[in-house]
Image (cartoon, grey):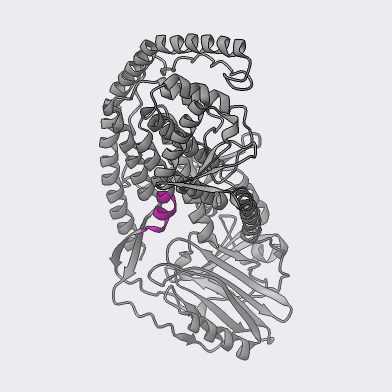
Amino acid sequence: METLFLYIAKSSGLIAMFYIAYYFLLRKETFFTANRWYLLAGLLTSVILPWIVFTTIVWVEPTPSTIDWSKVPHSVPIQKESFEINWYIVLAAAYAIGTVLFLIQFGLDYYHLNRVLKGKNIQQQADHKFIDVKENIAPFSYFNTIVYNSSLYNESEMESILEHEKVHSEQYHTIDVLITRFFCILFWFNPFIWLYKKAILQNLEFIADNEATKNLSDKKAYQLTLLKITAHENCVVLTNHFYQSLIKKRIVMLNKNQSKKWNSWKYVLILPALVGFVLLFQMEVIAKEKNHNPKIEQTTSKDEDVYQITKNTTEAELKQKAEILSEKYDIKTTFSKVKRNSNNELIGLKIKLQKGKEIATVMEVNSSEPIKDFAIAISKNDNGTTNIGIVTEKNKTNDKLVQENEIIVSNTSIPADTQIYINGSKSDKAEMDKLDPNEIATVNVNKNDNKQEIRIITKKFAKIGSENDIYINDKKVNQDELDHLDQGTIERMDVNKEGKTIRIITKNRTYNQDKNMPVPPVPPTPPVMKFKTPAPPAFPKAPKAPKGDPINGDKKAWKEFENKMEDYEAKMKKMEPQMEAFDKQMAEFDKQMEPYNKEMEAFEAKMKVYEKQMEEYQSKLDKENN
């Protein structure tokens, strides 16, 4: 389910990216047909690209197992299981309810459309079907069917309307409408999809207006028809409407000069963003061990049984281990949330060990990388009680390892040379025995250089670290680094409750920092513009058409309206120099951005070198740790 939500999040992000690029770069251009294919390609890319993952396989030497399982003590008290809300199920239910509601709305809209078309007299002319209805609805087209009420318009107006709707029909604009509606159902929670839908419908009207006026002799009459249709608010959904609440923008686009061809370079600006998306989210590096034997064996000592689990453990092997634990120790073992990558390696697993009605221990691994080797260890005390534990190799736990309710009891037999750390400070068994088990957050038991090591973190100390930003000698560190800090080296610790920061100064003023670590390149600084971002001129407000039509309506009002339209067209004509000046300012803006774009290309090249250096550095660290 997590994979599904991740896919939805990536798709939603791509939809937002395509819309933002359209809004700032393309919506004012007159490349209407190109904009149509750009917007449709954006939707298709948003659902296809998140499925494409580029994998790179890196072969590494197998990690030798150095754990002496028989000498590692494991004991856990029985703790009650706390109630957990599965937020994935909650989100999935909310998403499903929203999707069903929008599907129902789609069905109702389709039913309403069929009621309008059903039983009407159809006139076939060439490839088009014409339906003249009596209902007071706005003209629309649905595939090759054009619907209108001829009693509401004169001959000239009907000519304009039919030319407009024929363009919708001939260019299959209904498909665009249905695709957009489908995406609105799937991504109803994403506000950008509704803006995306509006942009597509608006652009389809621009296309129809532009093509229709090519076949009409009177462009002014066409604009008057646009204004008249404003009075019709009854529209049928799932169709292309002659009026889409865009009258002002459509008239502006009709009178706007054609965009210069060199402005079409803006379409390629989306490509770097797509490449960045792939590099950030669709690249996966898989490490494989050479000559690795996937078989998992059970090791048994005199007092302890150990059941190893690796990234290559199969479901059948997990089931077999659960059956053995149940028959031999009466321990109910549940393996859930099993996740695997494309190489069938375990990357996610939740283990619940239960004896009787109480939970002994719970461990959950959830990572994008294959899990590290670990084991379930069962031993018997002299008094006959059973100790249950989960151990990992050399404290190399997974990045997102969660262990709940796992602590060491005070009567556990611990070797004399065991190193004990409480909240990062070296301690002893006497101090450990004084701890209240209910106050312990986590316990790590591991072998390090043939010496046993126990690290305990209390709930109070864990809470302080989780709520604050931690700095050691002015270097920000994470919770794991704080846990491993020897408190005997601390000289001063300042806690800022308001700023939620913890600053620690050690006695020698130094903190482990590898000088051989590669230094990332510094990104370039955007240029300082010599002028503010160009703003387009304000268009005059188009006059509102009077009620009725020019022939049967108020002729005086229509005469005044025609005079206002002439004045409006004159004002629009005067604005052409301002629009040309705006285009020049945008050209200057693009010119000033060119050096910065080149610097960004150089920065990206340096980042590739840096990433390669980091891979070599990390590989060297892994070899040294092994």
Above or below, 294 relative to 527: below
443 falls in the magenta region = no
Q: 593 and 250: which one is in front?
A: 250
Tell me if 355 is positioned left or right of 140 in this view: right
Q: At 41% across and 72% down in the image, what residue appears?
A: 344
Give residue 91's position: percent from left, percent from top.
63, 56
285 is higher (above) or lower (below) than 156? below
Q: Quadrant of residue 601?
A: top left
| Residue displayed at 54% across by 27% down | 154
Residue 125 x, y percent position in the rendering:
43, 45
Q: Residue 449: which quarter of the image?
A: bottom left
Q: Is residue 48 above or below residue 221?
A: below
**Image point 34% across, 33% down: which residue?**
523
Q: Quadrant of residue 593?
A: top left
Q: Is residue 39 left or right of residue 149?
A: left
Provide the residue span drawn in magenta. Answer: 44-53
Tell me the chief SS of the magenta region: helix
Q: Nearer the viewer, residue 21 or 315?
A: 21
- The picture places residue 404, in percent across and down from the top left corner, at 63, 65
Which of the pair 153/602 is nearer the observer? 153
